[in-house]
Image (tube, grey):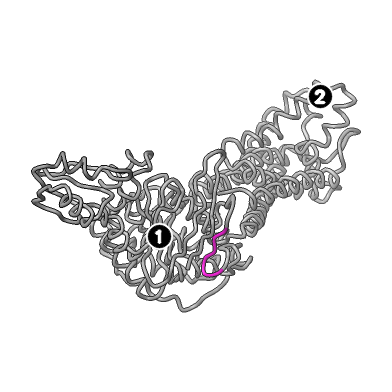
Amino acid sequence: MIEARNLTKDYGDKRAVDGLSFTVQPGIVTGFLGPNGSGKSTTMRLILGLDAPTGGDVTVNGRHYRDHAAPLHEVGALLEARSVHTGRSAYNHLLGLAQTHGIPKRRVLELIDLVGLHEVARKRTGQFSLGMGQRLGIAQALLGDPKTVMLDEPVNGLDPEGIHWVRNLLRGLAAEGRTVFVSSHLMSEMSLTADHLIVIGRGKLIADTSVEDFVARASQKVVLVRSPELERLELELAGPGISFVPAAGGALEVHGLTAEQVGDAAARAGIALHELSPHQASLEEAFMNLTRDELEFAAEMEEVVA
Amino acid sequence: MNAVAPAARLPRLETTGRVAFRRVLVSEWTKLRSVRSTKWSLAAGFLLTIAFPIIFAFATTSHWGTMSPQDRAGRHPLEIALAGVNIAQLAIAVLGVLLISAEYSTGSIRSTFTAVPTRLPVLWAKLIDYAVVSFLLVLPAVLISFFATQAILDRHHILQISFTAPGVTRSVVGGALYVMLVGIFALGLGAIVRNTAGGIATFAGIFFVLPPLMNVLPLSWNNAISQYLPLEAGSQLFTLHHGAHTLRPLTGGLVLAAYCATAIVIAAVLLVRRDV
């Protein structure tokens, strides 16, 4: 369980995390979603006590991270930035961490086998590929058999087989009752892995919801209409908070109104409709709809959806 | 190099321990010995500490016949025996800075502080591990170089000095002690500056640039201040004779130790306060 209350972090003039409050529940996979630079990694560093918050508070399993007597048994973390000495072997890196908690050598070997680094365990990590580095990071996160697992962009650099493995692993960890908190800037990845979503943008909370609700909420006010009198319909429907996006095949996407509202308005004006369908948004579209107003995102979105 | 398909279930860990200082000591020892460049640097430092005095001793014996009485009087057997201390202090200082700065440059400090979030035990453990290693490395090196150089000089029956003569044992052991203190000071600087180049430059500035700068001061000021600079004060630990403007060995050693303590205290305060 991770509980953040009004968590805020400034770096100089820049506010990286802005009043975040959320709770990450055990037993499910919680996705932590936002474009690059939206404050995900900073939030994770705050959770681990690596950075001190400017304001607010965050606890893991009921305590501040630094107050845990055996932190590696409480939280296992994979940080986005490399956090391994390049001159040290994977084995010695893990052993050095294990020894702080009296975790035996055989556990280190067990984890090296689990993540598939057996053949390269004695090589210096500076020679590792990005994917091997990620596997080492995952081994590190799981070393202490932690109650809470927190991974920052874990599938970065992994091959499709590795991505599949991470998904299964995360679902398995959650099924065992652990708290699993995984960040990503890729919507598609989250839709396959997560049960719940915490979405942030520019350090602020945008959504804290189940994946289904997230999609439902974002798509409920998007309606696809087809009509011979689209221009007149637009004039009838126009109003604050309502926008129109041309869709394929001469159709029109109406944002900000329900299918009922569009249908009633068309009937009142005597406009024939050839199609009127509530639009089921994909997770990507849901994300974009929610963050549409955030102009800074516009460019970054392309990368997210890619 | 390809990783094999891994299993997807995490095996349980039967034993659970907590962070304890003795465990952090063991962890830091593993980290110290498991970086290849560290081992090579220590080995090179050890060998140079012995090799340099031996070369010095051979050079002295081969030129002895043509040396002027003043030159001969300027050669002291203990200075020849401990000529390697200067080399050892450089190697140990650079490694001392690196021991912490490399954690920041590679990012491994984030892993380290995730395992030991109270942070300070890491600093104390590094300090103790490194102090013990550097002392146990340099002590045999200066002992070997003392007896080796004496054996070389003995063949020409020159510059003999007994290990048990007043101040000699203290100087030889003091040489190792001095290097150890320099290592501690450098480690403190590394933790304050958190950058390899900056840490080494700061060390060089304090130890090698500051002393000659003192010459711009009026002589009386220079005499009063210079003896308290870390290099000058610490050097008294392995110097046999002391002048009017130098500290006694014990005082000099304590002054250097005070510099170490200051650097470490500043490092400790910053370590707890700063973001990683």
Label 1, label 2: how many angstroms apart (C-alpha)? 85 Å
Q: Choose top left, top right, bottom left or bottom right for residue B255.
A: top right
Residue B267: x and y, percent?
Answer: 67, 47
Residue to which mark 2 is pinned: B70
| Residue A183 part of the magenta-drawn span | no
**Is residue A282 left or right of B128 when viewed as pictured?**
left
Point 82% across, 47% down: residue? B254
Left or right, A193 with reference to B218 = left
Circle 1 crowding by C-alpha within 10 Å: few under 14, some 14–19, many from 20: many
Q: Secondary structure at mark 1?
A: strand
Is B243 or B53 nearer to us in this picture? Answer: B243
Q: Which residues are magenta?
A: A57-62
A59 drawn magenta: yes
Asked where in the image residue B219 lies, by quadrant, the reply is: top right
Q: Mark 1 — residue?
A: A208
Q: Judge left or right: residue A93 versus residue B61.
A: left
Name the magenta segment's main secondary structure.
strand
Q: Residue at x 67, y 46 (%)?
A: B188
The residue located at (40%, 75%) in the rendering is A177
Specify whether residue A228 is in view: yes
Identify the chain of the residue marked 2, using the numbered disc in the image.
B
- Rendered image quadrant of residue A182: bottom left
In the structure shown, which secondary structural element does the residue marked by tag 2 occupy?
A: helix
